[in-house]
Each structure stands twice: as structure tokens, then as C-alpha cells.
Image: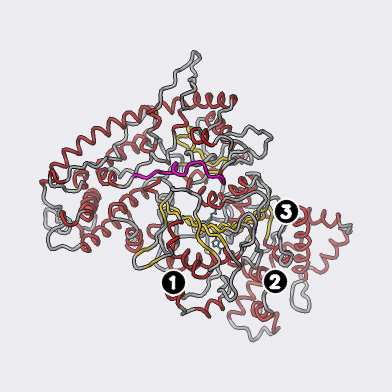
Amino acid sequence: MGPGRRMKKQGPPGPLDESLVTRKRKDAPAAAPTKNGKKRRTSGEKPKYEMSGALDENYKPVKPQKTNGVKSAAPALKPATNGAKKQKKEKKQSPPPPPPPPAESDSEEEDEDSSDDAASNSDAMEGQLKKTNGLDALGSDDEELDGEDEYVGSDDDSVMDSDDDAGARKERMWSEDEDEEALAEKLTAANIEGLSRKMDMDKAREDAEAQAELEEMGMTTNIANEDRPKILDDVDEEGVARANLLTPDLQMLRSRITDNVRVLDDFKNLAENGRSRTEYTEQLLRDICTYYGYSAFLAEKLFSLFSPKEAFAFFEANETPRPVVIRTNTLRTHRRELAQSLINRGVQLEPVGKWSKVGLQIFETQVPLGATPEYLAGQYIIQAASSFLPVMALAPQEDERILDMASAPGGKTTHIAALMKNTGCIFANDANKSRAKGLIGNVHRMGVRNTIICNYNALEFPRVIGGFDRVLLDAPCSGTGVIAKDPSVKTNKTEKDFLKLPHLQKQLLLAAIDSVDHMSKTGGYIVYSTCSVTVEENEQVVQYALNKRPNVKLVPTGLGTFGRPGFTSYAAKRFHPHMKETRRYYPHAYNVDGFFVAKFRKTGPTPAGAVMPNESSAMSKVQGQGHEERDGNEMDVDRAPIEDDEGESEEEDEFGGFDSEEDRVYIERAKMSRLRRKGVNVKAVGKGKGKDKGKKDANGVIQDEKAQETDAESASKGFSEETVPDRKLPKQSHSKTSQKVATGTTHEAKPKESADSSTLQAGATKQSKKEKHAKMPKETIHGDNEKKSPKVKKEKAKKDKKDKKDKKVADI
Ligand SMILES: C[S@@+](CC[C@H](N)C(=O)[O-])C[C@H]1O[C@@H](n2cnc3c(N)ncnc32)[C@H](O)[C@@H]1O
């Protein structure tokens, strides 16, 4: 994917959202300008940019959309009180934002207006949502997270945010080092315009907040005297039920949604006599589907996760984008230096919060973030804040062996590599080939040198290779946590998806667990994450793994109190009490993508007779037994990799696709030089190859395919000797796996194309002869073309296609 596309996909950094700007800033003493116009920081002062954390405790539930003159729902949302009965006034949390700054463009102004108006509609309700600590709650004490900002490529020992002074670290985002302070001052000077504008906005917001509180008080009094809202028999002037109107009036709908939420929140006092809760809920769900555009199925699924009030906030949050965040690549630079460079280019940014030493939140930018020289030089990656979390939970250590099972396009792999300071070895796998190319692109761009890229169906692990210190499974999921990014999820996820996906996730998680070395001296951990909020894809998957693998237990994620504990029960389901150690993240609560993170510790070997994730026969054996039935897991193992939802084509992938012609030249050269190194007469080999090209041997196997395998084997040897810090590579699977593996520095060792062949390759080491036989193309076994079934014919066509490809490669 080219930089331009990335920008388009992510959208340009949105206008500065005042609701997300910290309050700390306004409490801070103003820095006095010096003679030369620079602001000086006195010893007791905090630099302005320290007071950030737009994603942290200052985040307030997102504001609703513009209501265009609809009767303000704020009164409607205020629980009806009986005068003195309910004196406790709820603190309003989402005041209308201040007027837009003069310098902003029209569109930005529009956005601000929109949130301004909208604030009136549901502020009261949002105000009642529990205020969360936000990302800052994570703190920075976590040992595992220390040292993230060390620039591995430099000899500079004066690392910002050093480990030495934990207390000071809590206070500062940036180093206290003299030079660094000077730099930081420059940052302030460069950023000053934007920051002071934000301060003005804070002030305006405060005023608006006070005003809104006054208004709210007045409205509350009125509401107490009003009739109970008419929701279920809501008719227009002609007596037609508004709910049945063909072209729904969106303003009316919104008003009814907020009224309905208020009723459900105080049903006893606000519901009309003789009406049931179900009637109100059904009406609300219908309205949500119409207003926000969800399928009835998904709306209900998501609605059931929350109270009606919180569900409303969740649906609202899905209508606004999350802040744009970039992660500093500490293999290439320091965050401070990166911030300086970007500020010089007109980017307004701040550290993402005290919880991360590598994240920068972007408020405004004059340049496309996916095309700056810093981006191209691999100094950062555009990555949602929540994507940092699984890697932080994984806490990879230097010199470990890590498996990133579903890793493309590599946001987390490159983060892991940076935390490991390019030591040890990462196996970054993804089943989707075109996405794996994007992964290779990122690995190269970001200077990652400890990573091997593979293209397996992850269910093949640990057969491919096992014995890892840690495994990250950032599983393919429905994406219900990222609806703001991909609204198509609202309608394109069906009931079937919520059966298929959890099934795949369960199998992948078992494979992840089985790939870990429980004897690892430093690790023995598995992290499971999804960007989905559904219970089926999270707690139920985790519970399944706990049931199937008594040799793992849930452990704290290390993310502190940030995030909500996973459900220990949901509807009629009961989960392990330790499920509270898992973490849930919601857009409306933390202003991050919806996410789930669980961390396991493997305590012993996989028990004999355990259901293997990639053994469908074993699976069918246990079907019908207790766990399976309870888990509703009666499907066969689906070995087919989930297709990329984004449907990223080769041409469009992040790396810009590969030029196979160009690749061929490199592959050719590498082969030749390898042979030359071995003392082989390259020219003679070339001639020999040409002669045998395309010929079949006695088994019907194309000769060149064999040659290719030999090549790959020798490539793998060179590769393991030269590139892989081969502490624990099991000898058994090396040669077979090499065909599906590419290093971060070469694509050479990955000639296999088809899914079929990959299955053959991957399972080859341990497959029984019978299995192998079953998988062999039929004509190779029987040599009888006449009696071919349609399936055999299809296989043959596939094989022919593959042979053609191989022939092409062999032509080299
Ligand atoms: C959530 S994305 C991973 C994002 C990645 N961890 C990152 O941080 O950039 C899930 C990935 O799983 C891959 N995938 C789906 N099914 C798979 C399977 N059976 N084996 C391996 N990878 C699979 C998809 O191609 C997709 O790239």
C-alpha cells in the first residue's frame, strides 16, 4: 500500500478535537516568553506538551452528532426526578466544545459545529457514564515497558525517560537531560501556536461547560413536570406511527432514541403504564438500526454488551474517528527527535500519554503522515493506540524466540522487534500472501533484522516450528471494535461469521498454546488479542482454551488497571473467575479502538490426547462431548485462511506490490552466487537445468520442482546459518518449512505459491504416509486419467497451473 493510500484509508488526521485535549494544560502555569520569543521553562514548570494524554483521563465519552434544531434531548436524558427527592446533580461530562480556531478550514469548522450542536442532545446521559482513567491509568512503572525509547541504532546512552528515576519518569514525558531540555524547548516553540490555541479552546470549553450546567439545571426542573415520554405510540400529525415511516426523520429518531434510553434507565418512573421493557428495547433497537445503519443482528449483539445508556455511547463513538497515533520506531530514532522533525514539518503532536514512551498523538498535520521522509526512513508507523497493548502485554524480552502468528501488516511485529532491540528471533507469520508482502515492506522499512516472515495457515503451528518463548495471536476477527474505521462491519457481519470466526480463533489459540515452550526460562506466555468486542470472539475463546488446555492459566496482562476486566459471566454463560484478568477496551470509554487482550502462562506440556488444533479427525472424535456441546463447537476445523477483509490486491498492498520480473533477477543472482560459493560450475548447472526443464520423473513429479526444493533446502541452510540466531530451531522441520519462509532481508526462500502445496509442505514432517497419500494429486497415485472424478480434475487443473508457475521459476 502506497503512502497515499494509507492516508486515504486512515483519513487525514482529523481536526483538533477539543473534547480530547487535556485539561491539565489549562491548569498549568503559563510559560513566560523570553526575549527572543521562546518560552522558557522554569524548574518547577512542566512543559506544555507534558500535559497531554488526549487518550487518557481527559477523554470524555464522544459527543453525539449534530441534531439540527431538534428539541434538545438533554432534558429528556436527565432522569426524571421528583424535585427534592433526587438532589444529587450529575456532573456533566461532555460540554459543547468551544468555537473553532480562526485558522481552521471550513470543513474543520463544520466538524466542530456539528459536535457543538450535538453536545446538547445527550450530554446528560453521557455525563452519567462512569468516568474512566483512560490510558494514563496504565502508568509507566511496568518494568517490561521500560527502555522502550532507547534508540537501538545509536550509541547514545543518555536515553530519554531512563529507568533510573522511576519517580521522575512518572512526571515527565521527556528527558531532563540538559541538551534534551533545550530540544524540548525548541519543540515548545515550534508547537506553540497550536498549543496556545488549544489553551484558548480549553477556556472556551470551560465557559461552555458552566453555561451548559446552568441550562441543565433549568431543564431538569421542567422535565420533572413533564409527562412520561411517548415512545411506543409515537405518531405524526396524521396519526401514522413514526416508527413505520418509510423515510425516517433522523432528528425525530435521534430524539426518540435518547428518550427511550432515558426510560430504560429509569423504567419504573418513566415507562408508560402497561408497557413492557421488551417493547421499549425492541423499539430502541429498531431505531438504532435505522439511525446508525446496523443490521438488526449486530445491533442486538452489541447492544447486549452494555446498559442501554452505555450502548448508546458506544454506538455514538463508532460514528467518530479515533485519534491518529504514530509509534516511534526505536530501532531508528528517539521519540523526541522524531517529534522535533515532524513539528518542523508542521505537524502538531503530543506524547500519547504517560503509559507509552513511543506513541505520539497527531492533532494536525500539513503533510501526509504516510509519506514524510521520516516515515519512509522507518522512523515511525501509523498505528492505533490500542494496537500497542497486546505487545505491551506480551512483553518480549531480548534474545527470546517469539512467534507472531497472524502478523501482517506488521504493526505489532515491528513493535516486538523494537522491544527486543533486534535481538533474538521473531517468526512473523500470516496466511494471507499479499498482506505478508506488506509485512515484509514494514519489516524492511523499519530496519527490523531479527525477523523471519512465513506464510502459513497458523493452524499448522507447532508442526511448522514450535518451542517459542512467547506467542502473540492477534487473531483475525469481526472488527466490531473498529467500526469507526470500517463502517461496513455494521452490515456485512452475519450470524455465520460469529460461528466461523470464533471457531477459527479457538483453533488458532490452541495452536498458539501448543507452540510455546513451557520450560522457557524467560517466557512461556501467550497473548491473545482481537479488535472485536463480542463475547464469542473473546471470553468464549479464552474459556475454550482453558477447557482444552489445562496446562495454561490466565495471568494479569501487565496493563494495570487500564481497560475493563473481561466478563466472568455473560447472559447464561459462566466463565472462569480469572477471566477478570483479561482486558476489554471500548471506544466510548477510552477513545481507543475496541480491543480485547488476554495473557496466558503455559505451565506444563500439552496433555496427551489433547485435541490438536490442526487435526480435524481428532476434532470430530471429541465432538458431542461436554465441552464441545457447551461451546457450540460442533464444526470441523476450518483450515482455510480467512480471506483478507480489505481485499487488498497485490498492486495495492502497502509495500506497493512486488515486481516478479525484478524479483527473478535477484533470485537468479542469489542462486548463482550460492552455487559459486559452493564451488559449483554455474554455467554447467544452467545448461543441465534447461535440458530437464518441465520433464516429469517416474512419479509424475516435475523435475524442476525437485530442483526447486533442493534449492530451497540449500537456501534454508544458508539462511539458518547466516541469518537466524538458531538457539532452538528444531532440526526436523527446517528443510520443509524453508519454502514458506522469508527473512526480513530476502524474499528468496519463499517460492511456494499455492495453499495446497503449503499444506503439503507444512505437514510433511509428521504426516503419516496415509495422510500424505490422501493429499497427493490423484493422478500421481493412480496414473489413470480416465477415471478422474470432478474433484480429481479440479486438482489436476490446480496442479497444472502450479506446474506452469514452477516452470516459469525454473526457467530462470
Ligand atoms: C488482526 S490482523 C493482524 C494484524 C497484525 N497483528 C498487525 O499488528 O499488524 C489478522 C491477520 O490474520 C491473518 N490470518 C487470518 N487467518 C489466518 C490463519 N489461519 N493463519 C494465519 N494468519 C491468518 C490475516 O491475514 C490478517 O493479516
- Where is residue 606? Give x, y as percent: 59, 69
Q: Is residue 409 above or below residue 195?
A: below
Check if mark 1's residue and mark 2's residue have beta carbons within 8 Å: no
- Is disc 3 surrounded by few (<14), some (14 to 19) or many (20+) residues within 10 Å? some
Q: Residue at x 38, y 57 (%)?
A: 490
Q: Which mark is residue 725?
A: 3
Residue that extends furthest to the bottom in the rendered view of this protein: 787
Check if mark 1's residue and mark 3's residue have beta carbons within 8 Å: no
Query: What amino acid is found at the position of numbered circle 1 in the picture?
Result: Asp
The quarter of the picture showing ligand 1: bottom right
Q: Residue at x 73, y 62 (%)?
A: 809
Residue labelled with disc 1: 631
In the image, residue 141 lies in the stretch drawn in magenta: yes
| Element under disc 3 | loop
Residue labelled 2 has its Cβ within 8 Å of some atom of ligand 1: no
In the image, residue 230 lies in the stretch drawn in magenta: no
Looking at the image, is mark 1 or mark 2 earlier in the sequence? 1
Query: What amino acid is found at the position of numbered circle 3 in the picture?
Result: Pro
Looking at the image, is mark 2 or mark 3 earlier in the sequence? 3
On screen, residue 690 versus residue 206, left or right, reads: right
* Extent of the magenta region: 131-143
Q: CA distance from mark 1 to mark 2?
A: 32 Å
Q: Which mark is residue 94?
A: none
On screen, residue 286 versus residue 778, left or right, reads: left
Q: CA distance from mark 1 to mark 3?
A: 41 Å
Residue labelled with disc 2: 765
- Where is residue 667? Give x, y as percent: 75, 55
| Element under disc 1 | helix
The one nearer the camera, 216 or 707, is: 216
Looking at the image, is mark 1 or mark 3 earlier in the sequence? 1
